[in-house]
Amino acid sequence: MALAARGHAPSVGVRFLDCDHRVLLETIHEIQKAVAADEGRRRAGALLHKLTDFTQVHFALEEEMMAATKYPELARHRREHKRMMERMRELVARHSRRGLPLDREALNLLSKLHATYMQDGDLRYGAWLNETGSRRG
């Protein structure tokens, strides 16, 4: 199982986004560590809920920031957020309601979802924001 690189979120050049991304990756790492150490479903489930809640708040703040800065790809980014939250909620439901443990596939999905999201959409936004901001200043 490939563990998320602890504390090594790619920088998007926006301080609050970078800080949030570190928290997201740290939480994924904690989940993976709890599962690997067989600390029980309760701990992994609590961390999974923490990750889902934090991700939702992060997305809302990010979308507000994008709207305030008139980011031209906001609609696309919102759709990506929605798809990612749906996948995460499915994972939470599978884990919580059905009592299934988090398996390798689920853990890899968490890492992949967050890594792809950060390396794609957020890097584009960071570059756009920094470029646009430098033209305004």
Image (spheres, grey):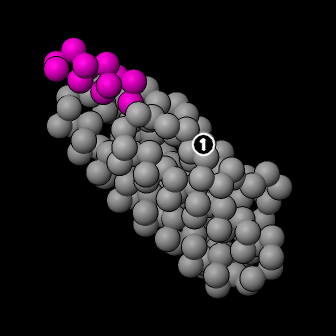
Membership of 12 in magenta stretch: no
How crowded is the residue under tag 1: few (<14 C-alpha within 10 Å), some, or many (20+)?
some
Of the pair 82 and 62, the residue shown nearer to us: 62
Above or below, 70 against 4 in this view is above
Quadrant where the C terminus sits is top left
- Residue in front for this viewpoint, 71 or 123: 123
Residue at 45% in and 39% down? 80
Examine the rendering and report whether any part of residue 98 can be seen. Answer: no
The answer to if 131 sits in the magenta stretch is yes
Circle count: 1
Residue 97 in sight in this render: yes
- At label 1, which amino acid type do we have? Ala
- In the picture provided, is 4 more to the left or to the right than 63? right
Q: Is residue 78 above or below residue 28?
A: above
Residue 67, quarter of picture? top left
Residue that appears at 26% across and 36% down = 66
**Residue 24 left/right relative to 60:** right
Q: In terms of image quadrants, where is residue 72? A: top left
Is 4 drawn above or below residue 93 in the view shown? above
Q: Residue beneath label 1, please?
A: 115
Give the magenta part as a residue range.
126-137
Residue in the image at 71% along x and 59% along y: 107
Look at the image and tell me in which quarter the N terminus lies. bottom right
Element carrying mark 1: helix
Helix, strand or loop: magenta stretch: helix
Please state which of residues 76 and 23 is positioned toward the viewer in this rendering. 23
Q: Judge from the rendering whether residue 116 lies leftward or rightward of residue 123; answer left or right.
A: right
Quarter of the figure with residue 93: bottom right
Q: Position of residue 136 (x, y in %)?
A: 16, 18
View extreme (top): residue: 135
Residue 5 lies, in percent from the top left, at 68, 50
Q: Where does residue 106 sit, x and y in percent of width and height? A: 71, 59
